[in-house]
Amino acid sequence: MTAALGVSKQERTYAVLRERIVDGTYGPGHRLVIDALARELQVSQMPVREAIRRLEAEGWVTYVRHQGAQVAPIDTASWTEAMTTLAVLEGFATALAAPHVTTADLHALRAIDVEMGAAMEEMDVRSFSDRNQAFHERIYARCPNGHLRRELAAIQERVNTLRSSIFVYIPTRGRTSIAEHERLLALIEAGADPLEIELVAREHKLHTVTAYEQRLALQEEKR
Amino acid sequence: MTAALGVSKQERTYAVLRERIVDGTYGPGHRLVIDALARELQVSQMPVREAIRRLEAEGWVTYVRHQGAQVAPIDTASWTEAMTTLAVLEGFATALAAPHVTTADLHALRAIDVEMGAAMEEMDVRSFSDRNQAFHERIYARCPNGHLRRELAAIQERVNTLRSSIFVYIPTRGRTSIAEHERLLALIEAGADPLEIELVAREHKLHTVTAYEQRLALQEEKR
DNA sequence: ATCGACGGGATCCTATACGAATTCCGATGG
DNA sequence: CCATCGGAATTCGTATAGGATCCCGTCGAT
């Protein structure tokens, strides 16, 4: 019937729903009603059902029998928890990857840092954040542990969503963040002790968490 | 017809399929044909489809459009990778949990160690392994990071499957493993440096991996 | 006034049916 | 003997329909 462009309707439905969750169109607690979505997306209920199942398995929505799905609750706590897990895994992945980082990689990584500096000058939070993620991804792309890479990617994506929902810019963090990057690169370049690399990478990420928590506490105080 | 015991058919189907994958009935590469399974389990194709979707999202099976699902390939490498990831997370979780471990917990944990010793005497590999898992689960049940706990549980389950497919008993490992447990408990009891606890717990788990790899290398040599 | 029973509406769950894509296998020609 | 092509069988993908379950507002009894 429809000129399916190589992807199934279930696939498209999944992509659409997920996109809406990620970009915040469907806020936390939003109910996903199968019938309504099916009508809106011009498909039957089956593709929607399957899409929702996938979203459930990946933790984007919670599902109760005979009651339906709703977007998983998102709060500061879960962001912090996910970030902490991410910090631990990313630290280890960075240490594992270090010996496999090429000089070309180092070049590219320093270029990214320059871009981050520029983004900071222009107060472009989005760009800064994107470049930051690119930086770390480029490193642990060299990590030989595939399972670890996949876990990282999954958690990263989850954190991104949470971030877009709750993030407030942390002004003091930008400059130190770039400095920490440079330190990390120096360690990698020098072939430093894996454990040292791991801990530096971990702390780097955890700093973002603590910075956020401090800012949050500050806001609490103001009220 | 619905003698449903409170669970949906999709749920049961999912449980059955998963069980069969976990216990090795369906070996790696085994094709899961929807029609056949639906007939066998006395349900329609829809519950089977959804069950397979969930299994796919959780990484138990791979799925290709218009071609169906087959049990994900399992090899030594992926077991090693998952175990390594597990070691890192479990190490960190153990350190986080340490301050929350009660004396009652310590008591129970030492009891488990005794049971492990008994299982070793009787060469009961299955029991030994179960108790070992119980030991670590009891500890990181006290970990305050919920996200981390869930990740651990998921990876643990995956590793269990892989293990049942490829595991060979490592005879020299039992005694040292119990000794390492005791050392870990002593550190927790003494309120040691979190980083030390983390690294001991991590190494403990990684020892299993290296022991397995050595044994594998030995077998290679024999041939 | 509060609590429990009851009914309507909404929503989900499963079964069946048919169309679409893929694969398998034999026939045909080189 | 091998490569290629076409058709049938297999299997997946989606639509539709009816039954099952839950939620919520209403009503009556204590």
Image: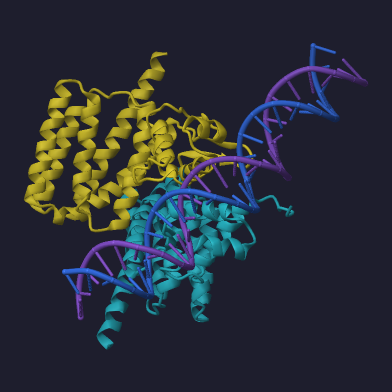
Chain colours: A cyan, B yellow, C purple, D blue
Please identify the residue farthest to the bottom as the structure is shown.
A223
Q: Is residue A179 above or below residue B195?
A: below
Relative depth, front residue between B155 and B91? B155
Instruction: Give the quadrant of residue A2.
Output: bottom right
From this view, report whether residue B23 is shown above or below residue B193.
above
Q: Quadrant of the C terminus of chain B?
A: top left
Residue under the image location 26 percent in, 48 percent down: B91
Q: Please name the residue shown 14% across and 21% down the image.
A: B121
Q: Position of residue B17 (x, y in %)?
A: 43, 35
Decide if residue B188 is in sight here: yes
In the figure, is residue C29 to the left or right of A187?
right
Q: Residue at x 52, y 81 (%)?
A: A122
In the rendered image, residue A142, in percent from the top left (x then y), is placed at: 49, 48
Out of A95 and B171, give the one closest to the viewer: B171
Residue A186 located left or right of residue A8:
left
Would residue A204 be visible to someone looking at this image? no
Residue located at (53% from left, 65% from top): A112
Count of picture labels: 0
Position in image of residue B183 (x %, y %): 13, 41
Estimate the x, y position of residue C17 in percent, counting from the top left. 66, 41
In the picture, which quadrant includes the N terminus of chain B? top left
Left/right of residue B179 with respect to residue B126 in the rendered view: left
Q: Nearer the viewer, residue C6 or A24?
A: C6
